[in-house]
């Protein structure tokens, strides 16, 4: 275990550009950024899971009504996610260069672009809610509830987007505790209001699925307010008190778009692939799709661990490339991988031995629990692959190597996964098991390709 965690073993001699910090220092630096980022990712992932969990008592129709809105919502937010990848990469690079003015200009441009884009997406989502959900595979038995949930959720999009953008900038500067606080606050409010509004506790009306959407929207608004307050601190690295321009100057926009344009292509491919994947599964039937939604929510917990470590690795990679120490970027990337392996090993056993129990938290339907317990075996196998590839891709994004990640997303997520899902589910007749087999193939492919790219070291030479 000691050798496994030793920093000196992470680099070849020809890669060294200076003295390396002690292993304890490297892990401490990574830990200080990673633990808030990981908890933040868990809280973000839990927002959808909490709504699914809380409406579970209303039946599998309510579960599917809430679950089927997830991918369409993420498609609408694709532009924001890609913008935020650029914001994180550029602010991290500016922090490493000691350019506080550049970092503050970056976050201000990000806020302007995010506000305009998110308002547009919110309006489009509200107007076209029904055709969007029909395309996503919604069944007539729960379409009305799904449309209601989705339309209320659209009011949360601008607040959620601006919160994510501010947090992305803070994360690039290593300030991950801010986003942890915002998302913890959002989740607490969401859970409380879910309980009160879904079931109609006390003087609160019983709004069922609509209540879950209102709870999420209020939580998103409060989270935005908390993250916005962080920019009014006089001593903050990113602060509205710091004299920096709000104008959309090309010198500020160009590096953001250089990263975000490729990231946007990646997000489009990913969201189209995930949406097509979900739509194919939705047509298997309500029981199968409800089971799928529950299992995807459980899998997302594994993803959240990897995503938190990925965010920490992305910030440290960007900062050290900016400081002209790509060797330290490699060290922090490999540190993230080692921690991902250790955490995934724990999650592996939790998922393996808690299969039926975890599914039963979302539904008491015997058929769903039985099918979900079997699907959990796919999740067990997927755990290590998912967290590892997410961390590798986080390193690449932090360095600005988003074009490569976009190409892999096109091949694996937008093409391989949905096509293989359809073939395995229908012509071959494997049903839901076929969909999860396709997911495993996708995860394996992305792990191999991201590992090869990270090992090549080409990402350390990208200029922003």
Image (tube, helix red, strand yellow):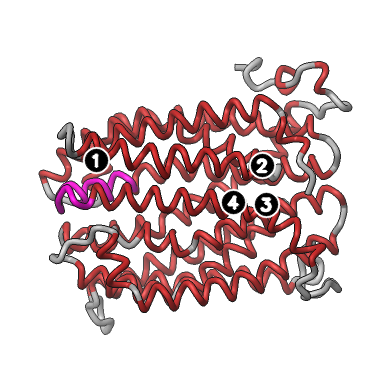
Residue for point 54% across, 53% down: 40
Which tag, 2 or 3, sits closer to the chain's start? 3
In three-dimensional space, the C-alpha distance between marks 2 and 3, rounded to whole angstroms, equals: 7 Å
In three-dimensional space, the C-alpha distance between marks 2 and 1, rounded to whole angstroms, equals: 40 Å
Q: Residues within 10 Å of mark 1 (few under 14, many from 20)?
A: few
Q: Position of residue 270 (x, y in %)?
A: 46, 48
Residue for point 22% across, 61% down: 138
Q: Nearer the viewer, residue 410 or 167?
A: 410
Label 1, secondary structure: give it. helix
Q: Residue furthest bottom?
A: 203
Q: Position of residue 411 (x, y in %)?
A: 46, 38
Q: Find residue 401 and name its label.
A: 2
Q: Residues within 10 Å of mark 3 (few under 14, many from 20)?
A: many
Determine the main secondary structure of the stretch shown in magenta.
helix
| Res. 119 in view | yes
**Foreground mark, 2 or 1?**
2
In three-dimensional space, the C-alpha distance between marks 3 and 1, rounded to whole angstroms, equals: 42 Å
Magenta stretch, residue numbers? 282-296
Q: Residues within 10 Å of mark 2 (few under 14, many from 20)?
A: many
Residue for point 24% across, 77% down: 207
Q: Say above or below: 186 vs 24.
A: below
The residue to which callout 4 is attached is 263
Q: Is residue 212 left or right of residue 241?
A: left
Which tag, 1 or 4, sits closer to the chain's start? 4
The residue to which callout 3 is attached is 259
Q: Find residue 357 and name its label.
A: 1
């Amino acid at each position: 275990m000691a050798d496994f965690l030793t920093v000196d073993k992470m680099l070849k001699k020809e890669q060294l550009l200076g003295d390396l910090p002690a292993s304890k220092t490297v892990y401490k630096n990574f830990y200080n950024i990673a633990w808030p980022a990981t908890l933040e990712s868990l809280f973000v992932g839990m927002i959808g899971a909490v709504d699914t969990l809380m409406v579970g008592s209303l039946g599998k129709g309510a579960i599917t009504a809430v679950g089927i809105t997830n991918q369409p919502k993420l498609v609408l937010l694709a532009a924001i996610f890609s913008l935020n990848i650029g914001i994180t990469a550029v602010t991290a690079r500016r922090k490493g260069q000691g350019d506080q003015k550049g970092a503050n200009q970056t976050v201000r441009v990000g806020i302007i672009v995010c506000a305009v884009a998110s308002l547009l997406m919110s309006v489009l989502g509200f107007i076209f809610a029904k055709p969007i959900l029909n395309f996503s595979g919604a069944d007539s038995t729960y379409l009305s509830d799904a449309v209601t949930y989705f339309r209320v959720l659209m009011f949360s999009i601008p607040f959620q987007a601006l919160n994510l953008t501010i947090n992305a900038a803070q994360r690039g500067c290593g300030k991950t505790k801010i986003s942890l606080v915002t998302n913890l606050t959002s989740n607490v409010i969401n859970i409380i209001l879910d309980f009160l509004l879904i079931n109609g506790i006390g003087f609160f009306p019983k709004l069922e699925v609509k209540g879950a959407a209102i709870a999420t929207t209020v939580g998103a608004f409060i989270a935005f307010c908390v993250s916005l307050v962080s920019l009014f601190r006089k001593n903050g690295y990113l602060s509205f008190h710091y004299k920096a321009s709000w104008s959309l100057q090309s010198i500020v926009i160009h590096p953001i778009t250089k990263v975000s344009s490729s990231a946007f292509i990646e997000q489009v491919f990913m969201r189209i692939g995930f949406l097509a994947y979900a739509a194919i599964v939705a047509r298997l039937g309500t029981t199968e799709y409800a089971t799928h939604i529950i299992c995807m929510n459980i899998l997302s917990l594994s993803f959240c661990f990897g995503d938190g470590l990925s965010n920490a690795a992305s910030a440290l990679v960007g900062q050290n490339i900016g400081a002209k120490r790509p060797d330290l970027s490699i060290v922090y990337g490999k540190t993230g991988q080692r921690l991902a392996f250790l955490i995934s090993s724990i999650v592996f056993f939790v998922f393996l031995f808690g299969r039926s129990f975890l599914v039963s938290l979302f539904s008491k339907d015997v058929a769903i629990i039985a099918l979900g317990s079997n699907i959990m075996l796919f999740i067990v196998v997927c755990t290590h692959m998912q967290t590892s590839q997410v961390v590798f891709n986080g390193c690449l994004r932090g360095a600005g190597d988003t074009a490569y990640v976009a190409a892999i997303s096109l091949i694996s997520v937008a093409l391989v996964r949905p096509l293989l899902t359809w073939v395995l589910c229908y012509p071959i007749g494997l049903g839901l098991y076929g969909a999860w087999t396709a997911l495993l193939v996708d995860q394996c492919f992305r792990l191999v390709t991201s590992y090869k790219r990270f090992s090549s070291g080409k990402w350390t030479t990208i200029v922003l």
